[in-house]
Every structure is written in C-alpha cells, then in structure tokens.
Image: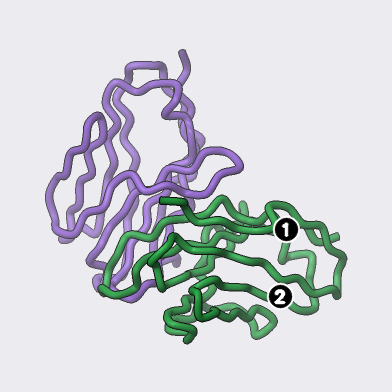
Amino acid sequence: QKEVEQDPGPLSVPEGAIVSLNCTYSNSAFQYFMWYRQYSRKGPELLMYTYSSGNKEDGRFTAQVDKSSKYISLFIRDSQPSDSATYLCAMFSGAQKLVFGQGTRLTINP
Amino acid sequence: KAGVTQTPRYLIKTRGQQVTLSCSPISGHRSVSWYQQTPGQGLQFLFEYFSETQRNKGNFPGRFSGRQFSNSRSEMNVSTLELGDSALYLCASSSGLAGAETQYFGPGTRLLVL
C-alpha cells in the first residue's frame, strides 16, 4: 500500500465548476501538506502549503486537512481553462523528503 | 530572483551508458533534492544534499548517486542505464535550514533510455 493515495483521474469539468481533489495517507507522522500544480512539460509549482488541520484559503483555492481521518482536499472555485493541469498532493514529516500522490489530471472545458 | 535551473532539458542515452544531470538552485538555497517522475510510479524522492553532504536518501539502487558543490549546485549521476530509468528527473531547492520548508522545483531533465 502506498503511503499517499490519490485518484489519478482524469477529471474533466465545465468552466466555472467547483473542483474537488483529494488524497488519503497512512503515515501519521506526516505533519506538513502541500498541493502542487504541474503543467505539461514543466516542473511542479507550489499552490498551497498547510500545517494544521482545518482550512486555508488563497483566492479561488482552498486547502483542507483532516488529520484525524488522514485526508486532505483541494477545492478550486470558478474553475478556468488555465487551471487544466495535473495536481499533486505532497506531504512530509519534517525531513526534506516529500512523498507525493500519483497526481490527478484535470481538464476544464470552456 | 532566478528560479531553479536544470541542464540538459532533454537527453537520449542507450542501455549501459551513464548520465550526469545538473541542477542550479535558487540563489541562497543550500538544500537540493532530486526526484524521479514516471507515469507508473509518479514522483519519487531520490536524495537530498545540504552543504555538500547527503542528508536524506530514498529507496533507489546504488546506480543513482549525487553530489553537491560548495556553490550549492548539484549533480546527479546514473550509471549502467536501464530502460526503466527513462523518466523526468526533477530537482528542488530550499534554504534547508528549517525542518519543513517549501521546495521549489526546476523544469526537469527528460531522460530517454533506448
């Protein structure tokens, strides 16, 4: 069983929809949680970084962490075609060793 | 501030050869981590270097090695290449001074082994 599970999709939604992306994890030592966005042929870029359980909002993006359930989510409101990318959850326990989910390929249709 | 740069961007090698990839971190960053990305396994951690010393290591065979120079630039070497080594190799940099920090990724080197 992988330490971090993420549905690879693909996920296709119409422009303006709310998108929900999720990851589950098994290692209770994970304390720091991130969401990266990766466009085709590019490196991952950091979208959200959270430490504690709860919600963190940044513009159209909201990251949610539930440590008791070992479950994290990323919500995208008013989705745009430019949001089409692969979204990767990542987490670590403190050492500089990120553990990634498989990534979810998202397409926003105009 | 310039981002993380990686060279070369694309590389084609044949089985049995060796390859060296280079990464220049963001100015002032002393930690460089390397990751392998494949469609089947996703992004997997290879190793991390801080102040010229390997500080963390993933579960890859000894054919994968790295080093870091005094200017924080890092190189990764893969010897005796196998077909399964075809992947996007990403490096990420951070200051390395705190226990949990944002890592900034470069564009990657796409390696194809024939």
Q: Amino acid at mark 1?
A: Leu
Q: Chain of mark 1?
A: B
Q: Position of residue B72 (x, y in %)?
A: 49, 74
Residue A77, compared with residue A95, is above or below; it is: above
Circle 2 Cα neighbour tier, 10 Å, few/some/many (<14 / 14–19 / ≥20) = some
Q: Which is nearer the eye, B106 or A56? A: B106
Residue at 54%, 73% in the rendered image: B46
- Which chain does the green colour mark? B
Q: Amino acid at mark 2?
A: Val
- Which chain does the purple colour mark? A
Identify the secondary structure beneath mark 2.
strand
Q: Which is nearer the eye, A109 or A69? A: A109
Structural distance between the alpha carbons of marks 2 and 1: 11 Å
Q: Position of residue B109 (x, y in %)?
A: 65, 56
Q: Position of residue B15 (x, y in %)?
A: 86, 69
Q: Quadrant of residue A74?
A: top left
Q: Which residue is mark 2?
A: B78
Residue A75 placement, left or right of B75: left
Q: Which residue is mark 1?
A: B111
Identify the secondary structure beneath mark 1.
strand
**Image quadrant for the C terminus of chain B?**
bottom right
- Disc 2 and disc 1 on one polypeptide chain: yes
Residue B33, compared with residue A8, is above or below; it is: below
Tell me whether circle 2 and circle 1 mark residues in contact (CB < 8 Å): yes
Q: Position of residue A41 (x, y in %)?
A: 61, 42
Residue B47 placement, left or right of A26: right
| Farthest top residue in view | A110
Q: Quadrant of residue A59?
A: top left
